[in-house]
Amino acid sequence: MYLVKTPFWLRAFYPSCTWKIPGTEKVIYLSFDDGPHTEATPFVLAELKKYNAKASFFCIGKNVAAHQNLYAQIIQEGHTVGNHTYDHVNGWKTDTAHYIQNIEQAGKYIQSNLFRPPYGRITNAQIKKIKADKTIAQEIIMWDLLSGDFDLTLSPEACAKNVIKNTRAGSIVVFHDSAKAFERLKVALPAVLAHFSNLGYSFKAIASK
């Protein structure tokens, strides 16, 4: 069970997290979780390049350790990176001390002040600790909508429709450069890029301080 569009009450529950990027320009903020992946990440980078699009990649530390060349390519091509923990831990099932340790472990490989909690599951105690600790990521990036590319019951076309129907200027959109998502991603991402480019939108990365 997941919500494609983030409701106002959930944003209100975590007010210190970033859910959208305010502004009046026709800009969309695509993001990709769980990489780098040897097949999905090169595909994503190639598709983004076709549209001169920039995006944000929230990487898993152990995947960066295993695929440092792909991580370097993401940065070299002008995209931003963020910490997505070392091995995709669920904040609701992990005590705060171990959660922070997992973020710090990922931080040995990922140089960024941006953080996205896996599954979007994080406690207020964990948020407070992250924002107070200057040695780890301080800006917690959530999302305006989920593409649903991780959903094995969803067709690639429905995944694209989720994004096209719900995205607005300033939206932070979540895709996944992962093996699980790739069958839907490889159809939905080109469709989304083409659709919004034709409407005059540009695609930017979330700024890392």
Image: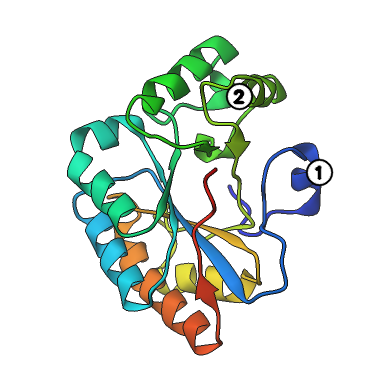
For label 1, the crowd category at 10 Å Cα-Cα, with few meaning under 14, some 14 to 19 and many 20 or more, is few
- Between marks 2 and 1, how big is the CA–CA gap? 19 Å
At which x and y percent is residue 156? 39, 69
Q: Which residue is more in the foreground, 25 or 32?
A: 25
The residue that label 2 is drawn on is 130
Q: Please provide percent x and percent y for residue 145.
A: 60, 58
Which element carries disc 1, helix, strand or loop? helix
Question: Which residue reaches farthest bottom?
Answer: 198
Residue pictured at 25% horizontal, 46% vertical: 72
Front: mark 2 or 1? 2
Name the residue beneath numbered marker 1: 12
- Asked where in the image residue 134 lies, by quadrant, the reply is top right
Give the residue drawn at x 58%, y 14%. 96
Left or right side of 198 for 181 = left
Q: Residue at x 64, y 19 (%)?
A: 129
Quadrant housing residue 66: top left
Q: Secondary structure at mark 2?
A: helix
Instruction: Please provide percent x and percent y for residue 199.
Output: 56, 87
Relative placement, left or right, of 49 versus 149 is left
Q: Is residue 109 above or below residue 7?
A: above
Relative to 193, say whether 152 is above or below. Answer: above
Task: Specify which label sits upstream in the sequence, 2 or 1.
Answer: 1
User: Callout 2, which amino acid?
Assistant: Ile
**Of 106 and 162, the residue lying toward us:** 106
The residue located at (78%, 38%) in the rendering is 13
